[in-house]
Image (spheres, rainbow, N blue to C red):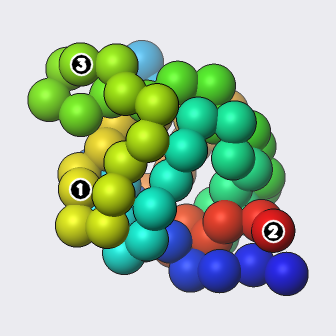
Amino acid sequence: METKLGKVTHFFGKINVAVLELSGKLNVGDEIHVMGHSTDFTQKIASMQIDHKEVETAKKGSDVALKVDERVREGDEIFKVE
């Protein structure tokens, strides 16, 4: 089962970091599914940052940056794998 968690608002290709706008809560260790027009993969969250500070939990409405395994695109949707 998957719950919609937010969307990608920016992607830094050289360092493989995505910025997400969250519509739900996200924790380090959660598994996410990234899906878009040409994107479809799952990964576990190893670390994330808000305003360049490491955090364990991000709340709804936060803009969070996280390292991704593959290229993502603006507008790609993020789902939490339950």
Q: Residue at x 50, y 53 (%)?
A: 26
**Picture layout, residue 72 above or below residue 70:** below
Q: Dot 1 lies on which element?
A: loop
Residues at marks 3 and 2, CA–CA distance in whole angstroms: 26 Å
Q: Dot 3 lies on which element?
A: strand
Q: Amino acid at mark 2?
A: Glu
Residue pointed to by mark 3: 53
Q: Amino acid at mark 3?
A: Lys
Q: Residue at x 23, y 19 (%)?
A: 53
What is the count of numbered marks? 3
Point out the image quarter for the N terminus. Answer: bottom right
Q: Residue at x 69, y 47 (%)?
A: 30
Task: Give whichever of discs 2 and 1 has the lower sequence position.
Answer: 1
Residues at marks 2 and 1, CA–CA distance in whole angstroms: 21 Å
**Picture layout, residue 2 above or below residue 31:** below
Point out the image quarter for the C terminus. Answer: bottom right
Task: Give whichever of discs 3 and 2 has the lower sequence position.
Answer: 3
User: In the shown orientation, is residue 60 left or right of residue 27?
Assistant: left
Task: Tell me where residue 18 appears, x and y as whole percent.
Answer: 40, 41
Task: Tell me where residue 36 appears, x and y as whole percent.
Answer: 58, 73
Task: Tell me where residue 49 appears, x and y as whole percent.
Answer: 33, 28
Front residue (pair 82, 71)? 82
Front residue (pair 24, 15)? 24
Front residue (pair 68, 80)? 80
Residue pointed to by mark 1: 62
The label on residue 82 is 2
Q: Amino acid at mark 1?
A: Ser
Task: Tell me where residue 60 appears, x and y as whole percent.
Answer: 31, 67
